[in-house]
Amino acid sequence: MLSALLPGMAQTLDDLLIWKKALEFWEAINPLLGRPGFGKDRDLHDQIRDAIDSVLSNISEGFEQPTDRAFARYLYYAKASAAEVRSRIYIAWRRDYISTEDYLPATTLGTELCKTLT
C-alpha cells in the first residue's frame, strides 16, 4: 500500500490516518444536515449526504484493492467527493442553512482532508 499513508503498513482500515481524518470530516458534516434550513432544500441535503458517505466508501473500497495504483485511484475519487462536500457546505452557508460557526470548522476539516488525500 501507499507508504506515505500506511506507516508501518496498516493492517486494517482503522490504522489509516486518512481514514481517521475522513471519519472526523464525516462526523462534522452529518449533524449539520439536521439543521432546519435543509428541510426546505432536500436536494442539497441529499447531495451532501451522498458525497460525504462517498468519501468514506471510496477510501474503504480502495483499501481493499490489490495494488497501490488501484488504491490511489480510489483516493482521488474520495478527494473529489470531499471537494464536493466543501462546495455544497459553502452553498448551505450562503443560503443561511448553517451558521458561520458551523461552516468554518467543517470547511477547515474538508480542506485538511483534501490536502492529505493529495
Image (tube, rainbow, N blue to C red):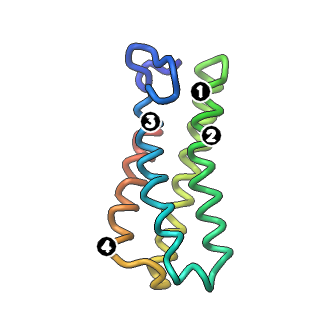
Q: Nearer the viewer, residue 55 or 30?
A: 30
Q: Which residue is mark 2?
A: 58
Residue at the spot x=61%, y=23% of the render? 69
First in sequence: mark 2 or mark 3?
A: 3
Residue 23: give x, y in percent of width and height: 46, 45
For marks 3 and 1 on the same chain, the one whose residue lies earlier in the sequence: 3
Of all residues shown, which one is farthest toward the top? 8
Please give the residue where the numbered disc 4 appears in the rendered image. Answer: 101
Q: Which mark is residue 63?
A: 1
**How far separated are the C-alphas under marks 1 and 2?**
8 Å
Measured Cα–Cα span from mark 3 to mark 1: 11 Å
Q: Residues within 10 Å of mark 2 (few under 14, many from 20)?
A: some
Looking at the image, residue 86 lies above or below residue 118: below
Residue 94 versus residue 54: which sits nearer the camera? Answer: 54
Dot 2 amino acid type? Asn
Name the amino acid type tagged 3. Ile
**Image marks 4 and 1: residues in contact by CB distance under 8 Å:** no
Report, in whole angstroms, how far the alpha carbon at label 4 lies from the one at label 1.
34 Å
Residue 97 appears left or right of 77: left
The mark nearer the N terminus, 4 or 3, is 3
Residue at 41 percent across and 42 percent down: it is: 21
Mark number displayed over residue 18: 3
Between the residue at mark 4 and the residue at mark 2, the CA separation in whole angstroms equals 29 Å
Residue that appears at 57% across and 47% down: 55
Residue kind at label 1, given as amino acid type: Phe
* Earlier sequence position, callout 4 versus callout 2: 2
The answer to the question of whether label 1 and label 2 lie on touching residues, with beta carbons closer than 8 A, is: no
